[in-house]
Amino acid sequence: MRPRRRGAAGIGDHYPGDGNGGYDVSHYDVWLSHKLFRDELWGTTTVTATATQDLSRFDLDFLLRVDSVRMNDAVASTRSKDGELVVTPAKPIAKGTVMTNVVSYKDTPGKYERYGYNAWKIGADGGALAADEPQIAPWWYPSNDHPLDKTTFDVSVAAPEDYKVISNGVFVGTQQQIDGWVRRNWRSVKPQGTYETLLAVGKFEPRDQTTPNGPSFITAYGDDLVYGGAARASVERTPEIVEFQETQFGPCPFEAQGGVVSTAIAFALENQTRPICSDRFFRRGCDTYVVAHENAHQWFGDSVSVARWKEIWLNEGFATYAEYLWSEHLGEGTPAQLARYTYDSIPAGDPFWQVLPGDPSAAGQFDDAVYDRGAMTPRALRTAMGDAAFFKTLRTWPADHQYGNVTTEQFRALAEKTSGKDLRALFTTWLYTAGKPAVGPNGPTTAGRSGVEPRSFRAIHETREMLAHSGHGHR
């Protein structure tokens, strides 16, 4: 008789219940309906996975009440506790077995909390918005909820005809329902993280276009936007911004582009192929910096994802540095000027310098320092490496690790290989040492220090303030 073996109920990251052991997901098929105002969500999610060990039972990260689970067509027994759906198959599963898990459920997502917050948002129009970081999936579909297990998705959601359903990837059509509702279907064909998977149901104004380079370009704007004109003037420039970023980071790794603007949130998030942001980012007019930031995540965060949440500077530091590059492209301030002005603006005694971007706590994961000191790090690295080696590294990194997971040590190894220099001390100083570095990001000279605020500084700073303080679950 095989010993009873349970897949681990977490992978031991910052959030102990996130992620599961014993299997690897190969596809999610999410087939749901959403009743407005009453906030009822029901349907099925089919999780196709391969057992990576012998399994007598395994966990899925999920908060909603489950009606049934069928595993390879046999009814499985289940129990739910602390955001974990524990599945016990009718028979033990051998390592290497392909499992088709059909989870049927009906519940009200807005009544649940995990880690002390509720990530499910209800719009003023009665619609719903599933967008948050580091967790959102448990509020609407069962999953292996950690960036380490990325895979492809089909998302199909039915809602009343005058409400639109927006998700990731490419739009694959509608189906008219007998009750007057419409089912809208979306497909993500490249590996995608669970927190990067979006659901937006509401009175949106969608625009389905094609970029000059060919990919689908889909945007959606809530019909209650306060700053709708400026939002459109900003987000509609996404293809232009992505074209520029391709010159810096290499070809865009995904099949589509786009963006969603909503009043239901106060932050922005890099949902794969379809970033979402609050219309408050545009309260002072057009803001392409938040668009540049979230689209840079398509390379740094979505395609190349962190292996552990402590590595989050690899996402946020490089997305903020991408704003510096966009600023230079617009003629509004160079990366050297922006990094040095930021460095000079923060006194040595400020608590900012006590946060370690390379290993923040869960509470500090989205601290200002992860963004700003995180962005000063690539500037310091560019100073040490030289432009040729630095930009070669920026392009090689997403190419070498496309659709994979990474650590800071891997990035340092690539930078050292490309430049032929020992960069350990630089990484230690900027990422792992408390206190203001004695030497600024431009090195021991005064390069970039003029005392004059770069024209883009305030826009970038205000964007970062909103990103770091106003919305994600643990912010």
Image (cartoon, rainbow, N blue to C red):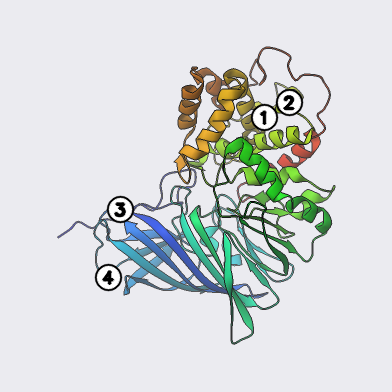
Counting residues from the N terminus, which is met first, the one under dot 2 or under dot 4?
A: 4
Give, as a three-letter code, the residue at label 1: Phe
Residue labelled with disc 3: 52
CA gap, disc 1 and disc 4:
53 Å
Q: Nearer the viewer, mark 4 or mark 3?
A: 3
- Name the mark on residue 90: 4
Counting residues from the N terminus, which is met first, the one under dot 1 or under dot 2?
A: 2
- Name the mark on residue 352: 1
Contact, CB < 8 Å: mark 1 with mark 2?
Answer: yes
Give, as a three-letter code, the residue at label 3: Thr
Instruction: Find numbered disc 1 in the image and state the secondary structure of the residue it sits on.
Output: helix
Residue 411 seen: yes
Instruction: Find numbered disc 2 in the image and state the secondary structure of the residue it sits on.
Output: loop
Q: Position of residue 45 (x, y in %)?
A: 46, 68
Counting residues from the N terminus, which is met first, the one under dot 3 or under dot 1?
A: 3
Q: Dot 3: few (<14), some (14–19), or many (≥20) neighbours within 10 Å?
A: some
CA gap, disc 3 and disc 2:
48 Å
Can you name the residue that lies furthest to the left here?
A: 1
CA gap, disc 3 and disc 1:
42 Å
Can you name the residue that lies furthest to the bottom here?
A: 178
